[in-house]
Image (spheres, rainbow, N blue to C red):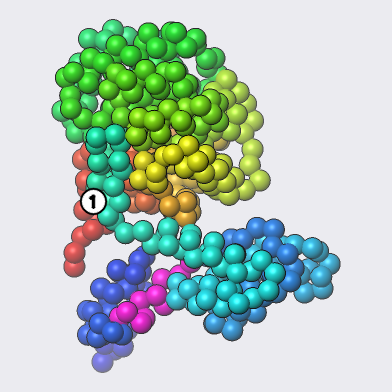
């Protein structure tokens, strides 16, 4: 009897986990539908909420059996606004949204926004990424992006693949090792780097993209923030534009991506490569990253880029300290509220060297660990130098995540 009555904690990370556990004990399907939202919880942060609205959120969540944390001075009205942490099961939050629809002030629109982000968090594994004539099934499995730097000064592989023939050979090796996308970059974005001329960037990347497109019928990405480089790269056969500035350095690039029907990667950066690592600071790390990327997504949509052509990247190493980068990996699921697939690029970066006290050419194990953790946290694309071991590590992580019982 003691064994039968022994309680234990089980891990519920999704509605599917909850449904599986309930089926295992014989719950009927109707009961599963009704209860699975009670097994998964969420915390939603809403910033700058007027005190009357904070009172409404607090009262409604308490009445539903949940909670809403507010500033200690909300009760006395000694402040005008407060951030609010809404805490409850998914079912409670769904019911909160229903109740907010009939409240005063601007509360109904807040409810609509909460509903939108909860829908984004619940996106199933059927997502595809459309890049010109290519459709990548990134919902089915994580895709690996192979890095091909045709630069003399990139932090890791600068100077190794300057000639188009050498670069093409390297790209084909990455493809043989399992790369799904080849990302070609002609301008180093290492900390402290100064921009090269547009002509020099074109001279480096266009011959390589053209030669690779003749050898391989797969998606090629160009790593650039310049609209002219993007135009000529897409003309040469590229299908994705990977912009470290999220369309902020050259706003015209968004129209180029839309014109060609290409996909885009919108990355967060604080500052520019020249100064980004001088003194990176954040008051709200994930909140600020999310706001920048949300604004970039709005610019992309305004230019005519569809949602299934947009990828976001939190920008590991781009205006972040070691602790910032580690926090981003740990809190990566928070970016799911933006509703776009997430790309993460930790490969060989300095935060790995700082943690392990290793030189850039000795960071494979650290890269594998950071990449595997990013995949477990929800990344759907990973950008790396060492493709073969990463492909194996990713496949293993996905097997652990999806393992049937």
Q: Is residue 57 above or below residue 30?
A: above
Left or right, 217 with respect to 255, comes to left
Instruction: Specify start and end residues of the magenta stretch as a single range.
Output: 32-42
- Nearer to the camera, 131 or 30: 131
- Does the magenta run of residues contain 246? no
Q: Residue at x 47, y 55 (%)?
A: 337
Dividing the picture into quarters, in which one does residue 207 lie?
Answer: top left
- Does the magenta run of residues contain 39? yes
Dividing the picture into quarters, in which one does residue 260 lie?
Answer: top left
Q: Residue at x 66, y 46 (%)?
A: 283
Residues packed near mark 1 inside 10 Å, few (<14), some (14 to 19) or many (20 plus): some
Residue 48 x/y as whole percent:
69, 58
Q: Quadrant of the N terminus?
A: bottom left
Residue 158 x/y as whole percent:
38, 14
Q: Secondary structure at mark 1?
A: loop
**Residue to which mark 1 is pinned:** 140
- Nearer to the camera, 96 or 7: 96
Q: Residue at x 61, y 61 (%)?
A: 46
Left or right, 95 with respect to 135, comes to right
Q: Main secondary structure of the magenta part?
A: helix
Residue 6 x/y as whole percent:
32, 84
- Residue 367: in sight, yes or no? no
């Amino acid at each position: 009897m003691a064994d039968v009555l022994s309680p234990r904690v089980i891990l519920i990370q999704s509605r599917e986990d909850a449904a599986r556990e309930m089926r295992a004990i014989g719950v009927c399907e109707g009961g599963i539908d009704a209860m699975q939202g009670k097994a998964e919880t969420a915390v939603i942060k809403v910033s700058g909420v007027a005190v009357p609205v904070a009172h409404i959120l607090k009262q409604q969540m308490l009445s539903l059996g949940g909670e809403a944390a507010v500033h200690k001075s909300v009760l006395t009205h000694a402040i005008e606004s407060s951030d609010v942490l809404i805490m409850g099961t998914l079912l409670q939050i769904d019911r909160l949204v229903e109740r907010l629809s009939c409240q005063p002030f601007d509360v109904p629109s807040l409810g609509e926004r909460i509903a939108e982000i909860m829908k984004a968090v619940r996106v199933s594994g059927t997502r595809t990424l459309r890049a010109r004539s290519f459709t990548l099934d990134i919902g089915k499995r994580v895709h690996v992006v192979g890095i091909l730097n045709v630069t003399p000064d990139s932090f890791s592989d600068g100077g190794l693949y300057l000639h188009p023939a050498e670069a093409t050979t390297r790209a084909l090796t990455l493809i043989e090792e399992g790369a799904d996308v080849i990302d070609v970059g002609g301008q180093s974005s290492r900390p402290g780097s100064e921009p090269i001329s547009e002509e020099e960037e074109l001279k480096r990347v266009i011959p390589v993209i053209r030669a690779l497109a003749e050898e391989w019928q797969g998606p090629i990405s160009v790593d650039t923030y310049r609209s002219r480089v993007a135009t000529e790269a897409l003309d040469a056969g590229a299908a994705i534009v990977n912009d470290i500035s999220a369309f902020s350095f050259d706003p015209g690039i968004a129209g180029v991506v839309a014109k060609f029907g290409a996909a885009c990667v919108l990355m967060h950066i604080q500052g520019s490569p020249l100064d980004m690592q001088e003194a990176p600071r954040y008051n709200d790390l994930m909140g600020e990253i999310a706001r920048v990327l949300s604004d970039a997504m709005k610019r992309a949509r305004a230019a005519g880029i569809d949602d299934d052509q947009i990828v976001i990247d939190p920008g590991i190493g781009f205006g972040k300290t070691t602790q910032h980068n580690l926090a981003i990996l740990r809190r990566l699921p928070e970016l799911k509220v933006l509703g776009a697939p997430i790309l993460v690029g930790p490969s060989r970066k300095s935060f790995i060297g700082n943690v392990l006290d290793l030189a850039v050419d000795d960071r494979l194990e650290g890269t594998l660990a950071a990449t595997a953790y990013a995949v477990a946290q929800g990344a759907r694309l990973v950008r790396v130098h060492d493709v073969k071991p990463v492909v194996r590590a990713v496949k293993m992580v996905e097997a652990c995540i999806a393992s049937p019982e």
